[in-house]
Amino acid sequence: MVISRSQNCVGLDIGSSGVKLTVLKGSKRGLELKAFDHETLPPETIVDGAVMNATVVEDAIHKLTSRNKIKTKETAMSVSGNTVIVKKIRLPLMTQEELEESIQWEAEQHIPFDIQDVFIGFEVVAPKTEQGQMDVALVAAKKEMINDYQAVCMNAGLEPLVVDVDAFALQNMYEVNYGYHRGETVVLIDVGNSVVTMNVVSDGVTMFTRDLSLGGSDITEEIQRQLNITYREAELYKMGGGPGMASDEVLPQEVESIIQDKAEDMAHEIQRSLDFYAATAAEEEIDKIALSGGTAAIPSLVRTIERISGVQTEVANPFRKIDYDEREFPPDRIQEWAPIAGISVGLALRRTDET
Ligand SMILES: Nc1ncnc2c1ncn2[C@@H]1O[C@H](COP(=O)(O)OP(=O)(O)OP(=O)(O)O)[C@@H](O)[C@H]1O
Ligand SMILES: [Mg+2]
């Protein structure tokens, strides 16, 4: 009898504001949540997607794995930001082997980096188009950056098996929880701390991805600057309760208006990318926007994106189709975690035998 040793990877999302860890277990009945947890990272630990202080990140990962008694070593991680390039290219139909052989050459034509400095990955997004060709997502990320992520993972006692990009992890998370419907175009948008990741998915296939350098830290920094307080205090104000504030006290008027101004800026920036997509796409009708990321927990941001785009917008629940024991994971915690958990759930779907 062959015993399959395949299991789910540990999903590890190293973001600029914190590390998120998800462990899922696949069973006959579906997926079950085994662990979710997060650890905050101080500002400047991760800058523009690059690890600036490896020890701090390693400690955070180590805390997460020991606190949650994680036995699995195989880990799926992801990278994002403007040093990661995802480009969809159309190629003649070819086998996986042929693709592996030619991808380096293809990458040289399409990637604006010195090919020696980057790792090249690819994923077939449409195995066969009507014209007898195939669509392939070419991914390029700086070797230095990937090496740093793998090093922190290993130094924390884990084995980095998969390095994905945020946009695709998000796509997998959404697929499991909501499914993709025929003829439907959904825009997945993760609004994190310093990066906004967008992925336009049509008929379950990625059409366009883009990362924008903005996020929740822009709001925190503006509150910090205008109120002349520390980053930490500004962060508390942003979350709805100032330092030492009684729960029935109202937020200073400035905080509300800073949040609203920044939400407008973000929504316009996102709209510019949607317009760009619409100008290049054959099928530009967007049916829905599904948000994730910690900053998507700001209700006025959700409403502003909906108003400016004119598209129905909601926050995706990454635990929607995942079973969990309510004694271990109280529903109010699940709800609180939902925005920040999206990418790590998408990563935790990866199996140890399908790298
Ligand atoms: N309830 C909330 N209200 C407002 N902002 C929130 C809330 N919860 C989290 N955030 C903000 O969301 C951000 C963290 O979200 P997330 O974990 O998705 O980001 P990240 O993955 O660390 O960042 P990035 O991927 O951009 O590097 C922080 O800026 C944090 O202040
Ligand atoms: Mg993130």
Image (tube, rainbow, N blue to C red):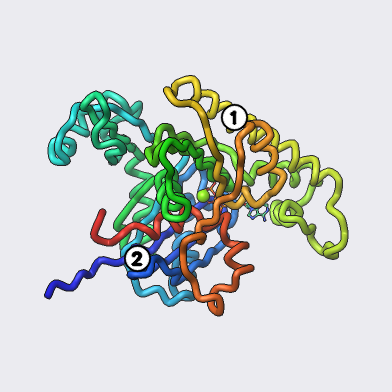
Q: Amino acid at mark 1?
A: Gln
Q: Which mark is residue 142?
A: none
Q: Seen from this angle, which residue lies furthest front?
A: 182
| 164 horizontally vs 227: left or right | left
Q: Looking at this view, is 307 or 85 the one in front?
A: 307
Q: Which label is found at residue 271? A: 1
- Quarter-of-image position of residue 304: top right
Q: Which residue is mark 2?
A: 158
The three-letter amino acid code for the residue at tag 2 is Leu
Task: Give the quadrant of the C terminus.
Answer: bottom left
Is 333 situated above or below 234? below
Q: Position of residue 231 (x, y in %)?
A: 70, 51
- Residue at x 39%, y 60% (from the top left corner): 348
Residue furthest out toward the top: 279
Residue in the picture at 70% in, 48% down: 299
Give the image location of residue 192, x and y in percent.
57, 47
Q: Which quarter of the image is occupied by the N terminus?
A: bottom left
